[in-house]
Image: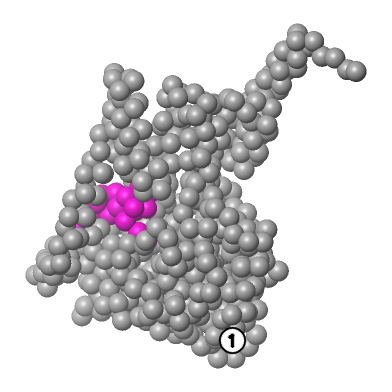
Amino acid sequence: MAYVSENGSEKKMAEGSNDAELLKEKANKYFKDKDYENAIKYYTEALDLNPSNAIYYSNRSLAYLRTECYGYALADATKALEIDKNYIKGYYRRATSNMALGKFKAALKDYETVVRVRPNDKDARMKYQECNKIVKQKAFERAIASDETKKSVVDSLDIENMTIEDDYVGPKLEDGKVTLKFMKDMMEWFKDQKKLHRKCAYQILVQVKDVLSKLPSLVEITLKETEKITICGDTHGQYYDLLNIFKLNGLPSETNPYLFNGDFVDRGSFSVEVILTLFSFKLLYPDNFHLLRGNHETDNMNQMYGFEGEVKAKYTAQMFQLFSEVFQWLPLAQCINNKVLVMHGGLFSEDGVTLEDLRKIDRNRQPPDSGPMCDLLWSDPQPQNGRSISKRGVSCQFGPDVTERFLEQNKLDYVVRSHEVKADGYEVTHSGKCITVFSAPNYCDQMGNKGAYIHLRGSDLKPEFHQFTAVPHPNVKPMAYANTLMQLGMM
């Protein structure tokens, strides 16, 4: 019978602990190099050897945050605190995870704990005050929202009497309308980092709100045999990469239609330029230029990831409120030739959802925490059958069997979605029936991924993938306008 002495057991434990520490250091190096997937891999291996180390969970939590796996990040931060309730960095991590999920009250509770333990920590107090401000702001907004007489920003605007100063030499709408000349002038103007006059921006927003509000929640289009459409995924405020798409694939036109599949804003610091360009093309070609809502066309995301701060910096808080109103009217899904369904996130937390159910969604609101509208914006595919809890902490992950049943019930061939960074700019899963396309190359200036867009032709509806790489942009870092609460270090 084998016998291990107590000292031998302790020695093995010590060796395991040393090996775990080496794996943590390896993971830290990958994290520093912004290779978050490998960082997660080696933090996980370190935890396999030493599952009672709060720091490993905390560091993996931060890596999950960087890959937008907010649900996993929250679980790891919570585990770190279960191991060591005095581990202050764990409270920071959990608060950040909850902030990313829009759970501001839960985040505030953790910041309160940090301030109580470290009353002289200026950073902790700043984060507590910032979070407290958001909680109070949200309560105020709810109080206003419950007032049935709430008016649109449009009602308080007097655009006609807004003056365009004599020293403004930039593009202007022609007789109040977007023209191709205006589009070309505006794109060049933005390229030179110049700001469109606020009167023009307001004109675009008011007009596009009117156009979008008349569309159904599920837009249905037909491509003739000789026609094609270009489908683009997330662009996330990467204006110079958007210009590159148009350079490679041609400007939008009645004979060169586009569909942009959500997440136009946030993270990238040229989100205003991206969204005003896309909205203007929608006005110029309302039947040939299509926009769907992403999970980042929402107030909570905009508050945390930069778009609200960017609009306030470049224009005003009032203009952000109008953007918010317009975002609520963006359609949620698009069906092409009754065979291909496009949405930003993915399929549903329950079986049985039909296209008719999508048509009936009342979309003019902030998305709920569950249900078909939430799923369309937030869900992700997974390789295994069935459904599982979302890595993001919102909606679900759905397997190939879920996709198969949905397509069969609705007589569809496949779905196209975005929402996830892919190294090649696209990914084909679920036996070709679930396609992801992502159009922000070198996402956040650090992921090193390609971007892609898809051509679909009316003749056969077979996806044709086109990849492209990031182009240089002015020295304004991503997240330049993001909430300071989203910035955290590691150990």
Determine the residue positioned at 30% across, 66% down: 365
Q: Magenta: predominant secondary structure element? A: helix
* Residue at disc 1, secondary structure: loop
Q: Which residues are magenta?
A: 297-318
Q: Residue at x 68, y 58 (%)?
A: 384
Find the residue positioned furthest to the top: 7
For the question of whether residue 157 can be seen, the reply is no
Decide which of 215, 190 is in the foreground and name it.
215
Residue 245 drawn at (x, y percent): 51, 66
Residue that carries the numbered disc 1 in the rendered image: 458
Residue at position x 48%, y 85% in the image:
221
* Amino acid type, callout 1: Gly
The answer to whether 211 is drawn above or below residue 489 in the figure is below
Q: Is residue 417 left or right of residue 120?
A: right
Q: Tell me residue 303's x, y (percent).
A: 32, 50
- Across and down, in percent, residue 102 comes to 36, 48
Q: Is residue 4 left or right of residue 336?
A: right
